[in-house]
Structure formats: C-alpha cells, structure tokens
Amino acid sequence: MIAEKMDVTSVEAYIAGFPEEIQAILQRVRATIKEAAPDAQEAIKYGLPTMVLHGNLVHFGAFRDHIGFYPTPSGIEAFRDELRPYRLRKGTVQFPLDEPIPYDLIRRITRYRVQENLEKARRK
C-alpha cells in the first residue's frame, strides 16, 4: 500500500497498512520523532502521521520507493547541507528505501522544529 491511497484515522492504522519491513521503518521513524518531541501529540493530517506541538511539527509517510519526511521549509533550510544527498521538495525530504534511513538527522531536525514552534508560541 502507498500513502496516497490510504484513508486512516490513527497512526497505528496507517503503519499497519504497510508490509512488515516498511512498518519497522515507520515505527522507528515514529519513535525517533517521539524521542525528539516527547510533548508532541500524534494526529493524522493530510493523510499522514503528524506530530503536533503548537501547530504542525513534522509529518512522515511511506511511499513506493521512499520515506517522506516533512519538517516544513524552515526545517529543510536549516539542515540543507546535510540533506543534499536526498531529493528535496518544498517542505519535503525523500529518504530512499534502498538506503539507510538517517534517524539521527530526523531526530535533530525534529528537535530544531520543536524549538522553532516553542519560540513561535512564546511570541504569541
């Protein structure tokens, strides 16, 4: 199954819709994000698992040949040099499934986004 064709209401259901090897990657991405953002809440937004902390923090999902990670354009810009090996779109990073997933980089980008959202919330 690929993310574009899924209609789910929970992160568990989303992950369960994939083959076991993809589920394992998604579970590890999820755990990595939760470790970096322990106060964030899980949701499904735009059909993807989303972590929310004073607004959307990051989204992630599985696709035919990659894991999509959506840390917003600011998250990508802050780590642009480290993200050069990956396909980038506005607000999106594609981690190929046939290469190791950079969990530490996901953790650091998520921490950056936490600080960014907390700062934004303080200014309001």
Image (spheres, rainbow, N blue to C red):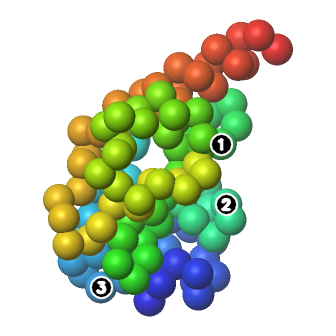
- Looking at the image, residue 81 lies above or below residue 87: above
Which element carries disc 1, helix, strand or loop? strand
* Disc 2 residue crowd, few under 14, some 14–19, many 20+, Cα 10 Å: some
Q: Residue 20, image x and y in percent?
A: 24, 81
Give the CA distance from mark 1 to mark 3. Answer: 27 Å
Residues at badges 1 and 2 in contact (C-beta under 8 Å)? Answer: yes
Q: Which quadrant of the structure image shows residue 68?
A: bottom left
Task: Identify the mark nearer the N-term, 1 or 3.
Answer: 3
- Picture residue at 59% right of the left edge, 22% below the top: 116
Mark 2 lies on a secondary structure that is strand
Label 1 crowding class (10 Å Cα cut-off): few <14, some 14-19, many 20+? Answer: many
Q: Measured along the vertical axis of the image, is residue 94 above or below residue 30?
A: below
Q: Which residue is mark 1?
A: 56
The residue under label 2 is 45
Numbered label tally: 3
Q: Nearer the viewer, residue 34 or 88?
A: 88
| Up/down of 41 relative to 79, above or below | below
The crowding category of the residue bearing disc 3, from other C-alpha atoms within 10 Å (few below 14, some 14 to 19, many at least 20), is few
Q: CA distance from mark 2 to mark 3?
A: 22 Å
CB of mark 1 within 8 Å of CB of mark 3? no
Residue drawn at the location 67% of the way across and 60% of the way down: 45
> In the figure, is residue 58 to the left or right of 82?
right
Residue 77 at x, y = what percent? Answer: 51, 34
Q: Residue at position x 52%, y 27% from top?
A: 114
The reply to whether callout 2 and callout 3 are in contact (CB within 8 Å) is: no
> Could one spot residue 60 in this view of the protein?
yes
Q: Secondary structure at mark 3?
A: loop
Task: Report the residue marked by disc 3.
Answer: 19
Q: Residue furthest top?
A: 123
